Image: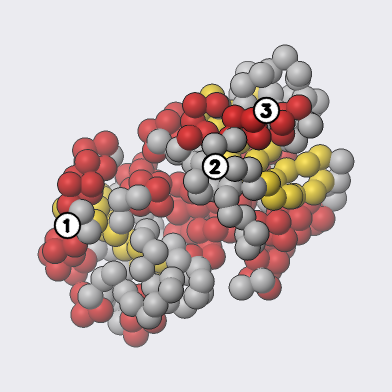
Amino acid sequence: MDVYGLIGNPVEHSLSPPMHEAGYEERGIDARYVTFEPDPDALATALDGAAALGVRGLNVTIPFKQDVLAHVDPDPLAERIGAVNTVDFGPVLDGDRASEPDESASTPRGYNTDAAGVQRAFTHHDVALAGADAVVVGAGGAGRAAAFALADAAADVHVANRTAAKAESLAAEVPGATGGGLDTLSAEVPAADVLVNATSVGMESDETPVPEELLHADMAVLDAVYTPIETRLLRAADAAGATTIDGAWMLLFQGVEAFEIWTDEPAPVEAMNAALRDRL
């Protein structure tokens, strides 16, 4: 039996185990997905222990996404984003997974599937990103993944953040992007084709990071928040006639991407989505 899992602190409320195990069951894969919660200063020991025990892959969450970079061989996207959320302990030979683990391959591979989660969430909802004017609210970890994902899909990206300097710094790393404070939303959102909320605003209060009067019907709005599943931002976007995409789609597709990296099989998206939404 193969073992995969999630490493973070805390992880007790993660929705990843039922989502991934539904995928294994649907594909007939003999595997389990478990959670690991090491002390924040014990990341290196935890990774070594996972490798020694034959764990095949790990998802990575707060507070380890940046620190794990020092312990893996990151792919180019993860290196650009500056964060890893998926670790693959299996070998990669000439771009293909070997059929069995190679104990001589000591450095696991690191990926950022949050970016794919953003792209695939929009694609699933038939939203074209190439040539789109995109606004990302937030310049933290999720904002970085969203900005790079949108730019790599040939969208023109503007990053807006409470601290303007942080948005400007991120924009300087993303090809063709611009950045500024939240005061830039009034100029950018009315002309936007795509809007991503990559902040936690709306998670614990009925608030929105974007003034509701700026939203319009000719846009698609993705809110990375998935608890609640329908945030105030999404309700306002729906009222304005916009295409709305809840955060569970981003969570699903980052997991789908990890599943496919680990197993080299197409993920059963419908089964994984059903298991995820059953827990929301």
Helix, strand or loop for disc 1: strand
**In the image, what residue type sits under mark 1?**
Gly
Helix, strand or loop for disc 2: loop
Residue at mark 3: 48
**Residue 131, x across and y down, in percent:** 28, 51
Residue that protrudes farthest toward the top in the picture = 104
Q: Residue 181 carries which label?
A: 1
Residue at mark 2: 40
Q: In this view, does 64 lie above or below 125?
A: above
**Residue at 43%, 74% in the rendered image:** 204
In the image, 279 versus 125, the foreground residue is: 279
**Residue 232, x across and y down, in percent:** 37, 79
Q: Residues within 10 Å of mark 3 (few under 14, many from 20)?
A: few
Q: Is residue 52 above or below residue 225?
A: above
In the image, 101 versus 140, the foreground residue is: 140
Relative to 60, is 18 on the left or the right? Answer: right
**Residue at 29%, 69% in the rendered image:** 209
